[in-house]
Image (tube, rainbow, N blue to C red):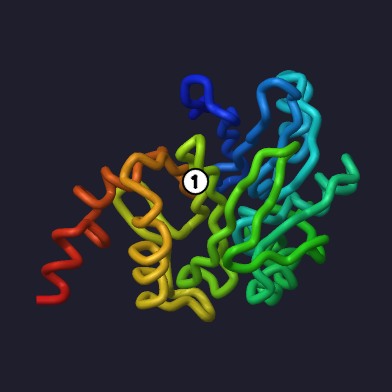
């Protein structure tokens, strides 16, 4: 687990990779009250509960960026264990959530279960963690219902499989769209600021500014070359 907190932020965060696909499940919390949200609990729910206990955190919310198995397969079990609501993703990913159990059987995650969120999310929505506001951006392309969570004061974003350090999300899944994905990154994420640190769905964290300089798919130079 890697601590990705900033000095004196309104939130703190740690990453707990889960499932055989090593998906970055993130726990965010308010430091003074220890109220927490788990973002993308793809699996290994007992371990996530142990982390919450070890950190003395009280879970209030489960947030989902998109409906793929490795991001959402443990949400139902985590809700059953804690009683907290599930918020997200966008309704357009319902067909992915409906496939979680069959996908889990194929990928060796037999405990994965589908669910109906307590609240579907859309572009411009807000989610709240004990008075801390996170903004919601609908960022289709990897999946049609993918969303991103952004905490403006902390300069922190959980982007799921939209963007990675040095890469971007796959678009060869059903209803994936490369053009939509590029538009989501450049139109929704880049305007948030180069100083934003983001947690991707897999592998290491980065900043939007670093990706604008170096990412071979969506750097400013790469996009200018594509338009030329």
* Residue positioned 20% across, 48% down in the render: 214
Quarter of the image for residue 131 reads top right
* x then y, percent, for residue 166: 29, 50
* x then y, percent, for residue 123: 58, 67
* Residue positioned 75% across, 24% down in the render: 33
Left/right placement of residue 109 relative to residue 135 reads right
The single residue placed furthest to the bottom in the displayed view is: 175
* Residue positioned 76% across, 45% down in the render: 61
Quarter of the image for residue 221 reads bottom left
* Residue positioned 47% across, 20% down in the render: 7
Front in this rendered view, residue 34 or 81: 34
- Mark 1 is surrounded, within 10 Å at the Cα level, by few (under 14), some (14 to 19) or many (20 or more) other residues, namely many
* x then y, percent, for residue 58: 80, 29
Left/right placement of residue 184 relative to residue 71 reads left
Mark 1 sits on what residue?
157
Quarter of the picture containing the C terminus is bottom left
Classify 175 as above or below 74: below
* x then y, percent, for residue 217: 25, 62
Classify 47 as above or below 72: above
């Amino acid at each position: 687990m890697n601590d990705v907190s900033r000095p004196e932020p309104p939130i703190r965060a740690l990453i707990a990779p889960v499932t055989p696909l090593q998906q970055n499940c993130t726990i965010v919390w308010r430091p003074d009250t220890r109220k927490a949200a788990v973002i993308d609990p793809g699996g290994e729910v007992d371990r996530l509960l142990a982390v919450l206990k070890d950190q003395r955190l009280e879970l209030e919310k489960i947030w989902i960026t998109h409906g793929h198995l490795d991001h959402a397969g443990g949400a139902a079990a985590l809700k059953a264990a804690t009683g907290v609501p599930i918020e997200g993703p966008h309704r357009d990913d319902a067909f992915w959530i409906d496939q979680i159990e069959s996908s889990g059987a194929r990928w060796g995650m037999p405990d994965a279960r589908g669910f109906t969120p307590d609240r579907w999310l859309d572009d411009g929505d807000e989610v709240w963690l004990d008075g801390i506001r996170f903004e919601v951006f609908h960022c289709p392309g990897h999946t049609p219902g993918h969303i991103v969570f952004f905490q403006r004061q902390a300069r922190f974003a959980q982007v799921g499989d939209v963007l990675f350090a040095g890469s971007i999300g796959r678009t060869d899944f059903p209803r994936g769209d490369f053009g939509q994905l590029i538009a989501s990154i450049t139109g929704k994420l880049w305007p948030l600021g180069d100083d934003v640190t983001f947690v991707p769905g897999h592998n290491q964290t980065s900043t939007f500014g670093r990706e604008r300089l170096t990412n071979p798919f969506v750097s400013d130079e790469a996009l200018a070359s594509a338009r030329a």
